[in-house]
Image (cartoon, rainbow, N blue to C red):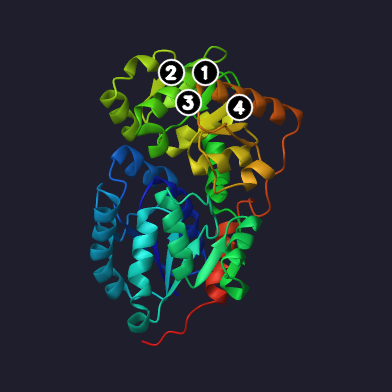
Amino acid sequence: MKVLVVAGARPNFMKVAPILRALDAAGHESVLVHTGQHYDSAMSDTFFRELGIKTPDYHLGVGTASHAVQTARIMEAFEPVLIKVHPQWLVVVGDVNSTMATTLVASKLRTETHMHIAHVEAGLRSYDWRMPEEVNRVITDRLADLLLTPSEDAAANLAAEGITGDKVSFVGNVMIDTLMLQLPIARATDTLQRLGLRRRNYVAATLHRPSNVDDPTALAAVLDGLALVADSLPVVLPLHPRTVKNIERFHLGAKLTPLTVLEPLGYTEMLALTDSAQCVLTDSGGIQEETTALGVPCVTLREQTERPITISQGTNHMAPWPLTPRGILGAYADSVAAVAKATPPRPAGWDGHASERIVKALEKHRPVKHY
């Protein structure tokens, strides 16, 4: 079975790594396409090395651009690759522009290629159509032949849209496969010692969503909230390139003074930082899942989450919206207190074996080869 796997940005890398390993272990041919949507070496090449991802068979090098331009570049560059590779399966993960763009191309070549499309992390919904990721998720799920869901609530979201039956398969959270494999490595690093930190005696934070960093008032409110938290414990903030650019553009550099600011971290170092934190404040989707798997309190700095299972069955709390410094501080205190009372167990399927179930689902629904 020939399977073409697409990765485009950092959130994809942790998901494709175990899928590629599981395909190889099962004796299938895997072809990796990196669209180059994430162009920064510190946030792309480093992850490939740390996670043991093979050198991409094709690198499209699309780079950064507006959503429309980037999507168009991906589609234009991907079409000849897809025709040349002629896989039985296209596997796309997550909700970035590369996910939707390559799915669109493949959906229009079904007749010529007899290929099927599988979407890993299907069925997640924030119901916030202002988020580009929500558009990407819904379109990908409508076009895919096999919807591989990471949590049990995702099937209900798909059913509400009229998608049911054998087309939907619960496989669990593939990103936790990577976390569980890398966790012993992360814990063996000297990350905390090098940064002068002690386990459970600091707070980690990440910040990159346009809703938080593209508006000067919103960005100032979040930074002020992190400063209030830093009155209790050090707040460690690896700065995303987008956030750095906007802090400079809005002249907010002075608000970083109370914080411990770092360059972007690789996956292993970031995992070590997350695992030992007293709490994590973030607007990342993946970190909501990682903290739930690790039993670490989390505060999500967004209006909605497409991962509500991290709230109902995990360690995640939503900060009051719109974000205010006092609201962030209160959510931080509530999150730490709640997890101190009882750490919830991991959700079903977050066991480190999702990638194996993904491969079995591909085998079960394998399209007939007509060429």
Crowding at dot 1, Cα within 10 Å, few <14 / some 14-19 / many 20+, comes out as some
- Label 4, label 3: how many angstroms apart (C-alpha)? 27 Å
Would you place residue 69 above or below residue 345 in this image? below
Disc 1 target residue: 197
Helix, strand or loop at label 2? It is strand
Q: Which of 155/346 is in front?
A: 155
Disc 4 target residue: 331
> Is the Cβ of the residue at disc 3 closer than 8 Å to that at disc 1?
no
Disc 2 target residue: 260
Mark 3 or mark 1: name the one nearer the start of the chain. Answer: 3
Q: Position of residue 220 (x, y in %)?
A: 40, 23
Q: Residue at x 45, y 25 (%)?
A: 222
Q: Which quarter of the figure is the N terminus placed in?
A: bottom left
Disc 3 target residue: 191
**Residue located farthest toward the right when viewing the structure as drawn:** 341
Would you place residue 134 above or below residue 92 in this image? above
- Label 1, label 4: how many angstroms apart (C-alpha)? 23 Å
Crowding at dot 4, Cα within 10 Å, few <14 / some 14-19 / many 20+, comes out as many
Q: Residue at x 58, y 57 (%)?
A: 354
Tag in front: 2 or 4 = 4
